[in-house]
Amino acid sequence: MSAPRLSKEKAGDTSARTLPCLPDDLSYGMGHHLAFHKKPDALRGGLMADECDGTSKPEKQRERVSWSGYFAPPQAFSWDQGQVDGDADLRSQLSDAIEEHVLDELVSNHGRVDRERSQARSQALQGLHTILLSALLESRPDVFRSLVDRLSASAIPILEICENLIMPMVAELGRRWSSDTESFVTIAVAMSRLQRLVTELTIARQSRFSTNPPRTALFARMPENEHTIGLAVISACFAENGWGVAGGADLQAGDRANSLLHDIPCHLFGLSVGCGCDMDSVKDVMDEARQSTRRDPLCICIGGPGLRGREGEFLALGADFEASDLRQSLKMADSLVH
């Protein structure tokens, strides 16, 4: 639908007026204009837009939604496509025009602001890499505690913290282990501290999670997979995204996991596999999970270090999707589980 334009019945002044600025979160990047034209004899009793903007100053460098004219009774205007009969019809068409053209632009620009803020948060988190690495590799509990408290109290989503700080730190510790820059003991202790950070962050944010989640996920790992931080990370991200979460880094696939699948109406079963995992064993775990659950169908996701280089193989075994990326995993789960 194209925006209806209002035209004057008679020639008159079309000087622009400015409405009060929208809140910064919404007005950022706004440059949309709605063209209204006033009828000279309709000004009496109309509310001038600049009269309600006590803070508007021409020198302010801020984009605004501009209106040329005043608010006036509907009968003071005529539509280009013909005179509209009745105030209700006029209001309806005007509402449709605003909904289609103004709100769409508000959403578009608001999304751009969110992306820019996300980029700024990413840069801030990346600036903490050196500090966190030092706190993990050295015995500096004061620095570690300060980081945990700072991140817990922040408004930065756990997903962004994991993407921009936790997972890059896991990769850095892995590189240091591979290059013999650090000893096995040092890396093991650092990984333990990093997982503790994720756990404490999750606990601190629990009050922000849904108290009655509509969907539940159970996460477990294959017995031979000792890389547990990935499960801690994905559990935290799912909880923040509105899921109920059970299991996690301490739960191995097997009898206990199957009992939980039977007792809890789980929508998703996430299984973390280690490097060199036996595919037949993974297939057995998936089959047992589907036999144990009372929910049909049960969505199964495969992730973990054993996924690298074997993408697609677990789908052939019957998995619904493979979790090679945090954000993509959340999107896939949301699309498959309703």
Image (cartoon, rainbow, N blue to C red):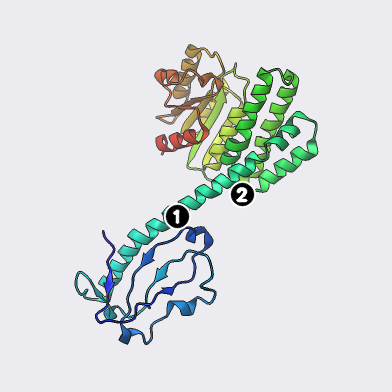
| Residue closer to the observer: 106 or 322 | 106
Residue placed under numbered mark 2 in the picture: 155
Q: Is residue 135 above or below residue 99?
A: above
Q: Can residue 202 be seen in this view?
A: no
| Residue closer to the observer: 114 or 28 | 28
Which percent across, then down, holds residue 40?
A: 32, 85
| Residue closer to the observer: 229 or 24 | 24
- Picture quadrant of residue 93: bottom left
Residue placed under numbered mark 1 in the picture: 109
Q: What element carries label 2?
A: loop
Q: Which amino acid does label 2 sit on?
A: Ala
Which percent across, then down, holds residue 311?
A: 45, 21
Identify the residue at image location x=47%, y=34%. Answer: 328
Left or right of 262, for residue 228: right
Identify the residue at image location x=52%, y=45%. Answer: 212
Which percent across, then down, holds residue 152?
A: 67, 44
Rendered-image quadrant of the N terminus:
bottom left
- Picture quadrant of residue 198: top right
Rendered-image quadrant of the C terminus:
top left
Q: Which amino acid does label 1 sit on?
A: Asn
| Residue closer to the observer: 243 or 84 | 84
Q: Which of marks 1 and 2 is in front?
A: 1
